[in-house]
Structure formats: C-alpha cells, structure tokens
Image (cartoon, coloured by chain):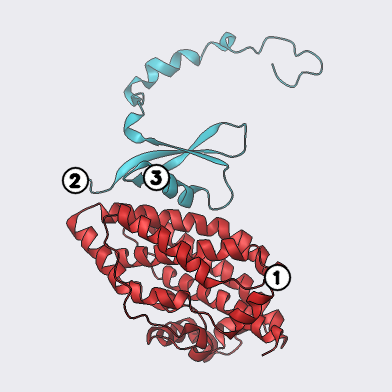
Chain colours: A red, B cyan
Amino acid sequence: MTKQEALYKYVLRLGDHALIQGHRLSEWCSKGPILEEDLALTNLALDNIGRAQAFLKYAAELQGLGNTEDDLAYKRGEREFYNSLMSELPTGDFAFTIAKQMLISVFEYFQFTALSHSADETIAGIAAKTLKEVRYHMMHARDWCYRLGKGTEESNRRLQNAINELWMFTGDLFEMNDEDKMLEVLDIAIDLNEIKTQFNTLVQTILRESDIRIPENGYMQTGSKKGIHTEHLGHILSEMQYLQRTYPDAKW
Amino acid sequence: MDTQLDLWEVFIQSKAGSHHVHAGSVHASDEAMALQNARDIYTRRNEGSSLWVVPAKYITASSSADADMLFDPANDKIYRHPTFYIMPEGAKQI
C-alpha cells in the first residue's frame, strides 16, 4: 500500500461515515417528535452531507481516476464502504437516535479536534470547519440525553435500552487498520486509542448525569474499516443509490 | 388542550450593535432547548449573530380593543413629528 492509497482509504472512511450518518438522520424528515426537533435533526443531516461532500471530493482527487464525489457516493458497493457500523444502524425510536447521535458526536468531537492538527492541510481544513458543527451536535444530543434520562420512567427506560444496544458498536469506532498506522507516523492520521480514553470519560459523565447506567464492556462488533458491515448498509445503499443504478448518469 | 411544549418568543440580532428584532416563536421545554430550536429554525441562512429567547408568558401585550385609545391620538397631530425644522446642511437625519 502506497501513502497515496492509504490516504485515499482514510479520507474515504471519513466521507462515508458522514454520508451514512447524514442519510440516517435525513430519515427523520417530516417524522420528528415536534416540528422544532424535526428541523434540528434534518439540520444535523445537512451538516453531515456537507462534510461527506468535502471529504469524498478530496478522496476522488486522491484516487486520480477522474471520478467526482457523486461517483464515489453512488457507484460503490457495500464492501467498498468504510463508514462506522454505528452510523448505519436503523434510526429506531427517538431515544435510540439521540443515544446514537450523542455517542457519535462525542467521538467526532475528539476525532476532529485531533484531525484539525493533521499534517495533511485538506484534512485539517475540513476538520476545523467540522469541529464547529460537531460541537453543536454534541450539545444538542447531550441535552436530550439529560431530558430523556431524567424525564419519565418510560423515557429513561428507552434511553437506557438504546445505550445498552449501541454499546457493542462503540469498539468499531476505535479500531485501527494498516492505513491508520502508516499515516499516523506521518502525523496525518490520529491515534484512536488516545481518543478512546477521552471518549469514555466524557460519555460516562453524560450518562451519569442523565441517570443512565454505563454498560459493561463486553463483546464488540468490528469490521467497518475492512468494509465488513451489518445487514443494514445494503438496504441504505439500495435506497440511496436507486436512481443512479436504475438510470445511470441521468441528468435533469 | 394544548399538548405543545411552552411557547418562547425569538429575537435575532443581525449584526453586532444592531437591535434584536422579533423573528417568531418556538416551542421548547427549557431555556437550552428554546435557544437551540431558535437557532435551528431562524438562523440557518446566516440571519444572525446573537439570539434572545423569552418565555411568551412574560410578555405583556396591549389589547386590540384598546388600539383606538392608545394609538389614534397620534394620528391627526402632525406637530408631534419634528417635520417643521429645516434640515441643517450635512445632517442625514435629525
């Protein structure tokens, strides 16, 4: 693997994660619990789609085959996607979406804080811009954790169930691959083990303040960085890529 | 019965130094949610640099039945407006 190939895969991963997370959030459009939250969730979706566009555009440049960000988003199969497993999980109920958004935002907050110092200027630039958005996502999800956790018996139970179900997908966020190790030496990629400690501390604080029990670290699902996914990714792609697959390169 | 969350009025300042202007309202259960909802609904297209949210219940409004009493007297007394002064040269407004 050359540096260029490693960088391509690394950037692709950052783009894929945002694309799939954005797509999942967009599924709340017109289905939010109240009008205001409907707009809030779709706002988060748009931030993610914008980030995906920036990273996939850079990935297409690195790939050097004349592809665009749209080609990468709509013409790759399931095994060629490197988004985190957590991002592809179905939206579930509102508590599940909030729990997922909180875990992902806390991860992204530390990830992009570190990446904003990357030796790769394009990554550092996108990371700095993303960090502003992610701080808001994290605050929004955290405040909802407080409300649900300290709300009614039912809202607490739903949030607790969501955290219990999601916990085994947290390990996947921190798995490091060959490209991570290769690029970390060059100060381009970041050490996810360092992020893991920061993540655990902040997530535990938020959960404790929300009256939610922290699950035991048991079996962890992994594989996204090798392109191995849950059964849910294929379903997202079949919907997201439908137009492109049915009418290739359609223009209007 | 109104099952919505509490109503808050939203005021936006478009740029530093200018007034906060009423933009509309949002529903929210607490201050933090009111600010976030206001941000998401009213400032997505670069409309503001500062936000105020105020619980609607703390706003005292005049009654429309009193409109005649309150506002009519100002209508026919043009001398209440400083329109009879000659504008000094160079002044944009007085």
Looking at the image, which residue is at 39% across and 18% down?
B68
Q: Which residue is mark 1?
A: A120
| Residues flagged by tags 2 and 1 on a common chain | no
Residue A131, compared with residue B76, is above or below; it is: below
Residue B18 spot, x, y in % from top left: 60, 32
Q: Amino acid at mark 3?
A: Ala
Relative depth, front residue between B83 and A155:
A155
Q: Could you tell me how far apart the alpha carbons at marks 2 and 1 are, in whole angstroms?
A: 57 Å
Q: Is residue A45 above or below residue A145?
A: below
Mark 1 secondary-structure assignment: loop
**Which element carries disc 2, helix, strand or loop?**
loop
Crowdedness near tag 2: few (<14), some (14–19) or many (≥20) residues, C-alpha within 10 Å: few
Q: Nearer the viewer, residue A163 or A155?
A: A163
Disc 1 marks a residue whose amino acid type is Asp
Position of B72 with respect to A75 (left or right) is left
| Mark 3 vs mark 1: in front | 1
Counting from the top left corner in percent of width and height, residue A101 is at: 41, 65
Residue depicted at x 52% and y 35%: B21
- The residue where tag 3 is placed is B32
Disc 2 or disc 3, which is closer to the eye? 3
Relative height, residue A69 to residue A161 (above, below): below
Answer with mark 2 or mark 3, whichever residue precedes in sequence.
Answer: 2
Q: Residue placed at 62% from the left, 35% from the top?
A: B16
Q: Name the residue located 29 percent from the left edge and 68 percent from the top edge.
A: A215
- The residues tagged by marks 2 and 3 sit, at their Cα atoms, a distance apart of 25 Å
